[in-house]
Amino acid sequence: DGVAEGFAQQFNAQVDEVLAAESVARHMEQIFDFGKDARQLLNLFVAAACQLSAQVQFLQLACVEASIARDVASAKMQVLSSVSLLELSLIISMKSLVQSGSSKYNFEMVYNEYKTFMSRHLLVASAGGAMKVYKKPVALKAFETLVELEIVRPVATSVAADGGGSYGRNDLLAGSAQAARAPKEYRMVQLMIEPGQVVELVLDRVDVPAVIRRWAQ
């Protein structure tokens, strides 16, 4: 009662338009696939609806996308809180590469960064807690776990030899024809969290040795 029919129709049409947007539909599908949590979906739209006012009377796609971004960041931090110390060390290695000016990198670069730091600080670290340098096959398995968790994603790379295409998020792990040309250790990737989030993660964990904590900062 009290809502003009024309306004209601216009409001609902705008909601339908927002729901049809690719970014929103994809996130809703992910919520459905992973847990079917209606509360998560409700919280997503309540946050966007709170932005409505006399000046902004219709649901805005930008507000919903901002809610999605916060939701994704929160979910990533929950996943990150359970990664192993080796996986965390590889994440810090990628953060170091980013801060050194590398926008993309591969496992070999990440492992070299990790091994260089650990070799330099191993004696100091041993005095402050049990630590060791993991061999490359073990580190690669940890790296693949980060890819599976989508904390790390392959960089889209055109493949001219077979007429086009690009690496998807699972191509780093796939035994495809692309893998014969580009071993997974050398495929370029990017870290999907910000350096500040890496620092926050390290500071929140009590099981991180002091030398690793300093490295992250």
Image (cartoon, rainbow, N blue to C red):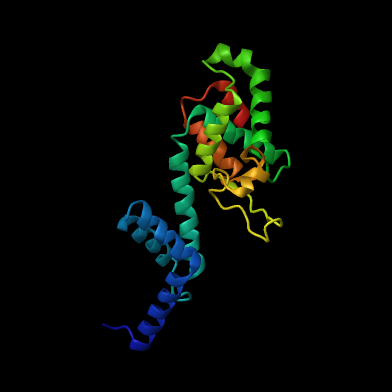
Residue drawn at 69 percent across, 46 percent down: 103
Looking at the image, which is closer to me, 30 or 124?
30
Residue drawn at x 48%, y 70% as measured from the top left: 21
Q: Is residue 60 placed above or below 183 in the rendered structure?
A: below
In this picture, residue 11 sits left or right of residue 148: left
Residue 75: % across, % down: 44, 47
**Residue 88 to residue 49: above or below:** above
Image coordinates of residue 164 in percent, x first then y, are 66, 60
Image location (x, y in percent) of residue 1: 26, 82
175 sits to left or right of 187: left
Residue found at the far left of this picture: 1
Q: Nearer the viewer, residue 46 or 34?
A: 34
Instruction: Residue 106: name its quadrant.
Output: top right
The quadrant of the image that shows the C terminus is: top right
Q: Nearer the viewer, residue 215 or 144?
A: 144
Left or right relative to 190: residue 81: left
Residue at left offset 54%, top offset 45%: 174
| Residue drawn at the location 49% of the way across and 43% of the way down | 148
Residue located farthest toward the right when viewing the structure as drawn: 101
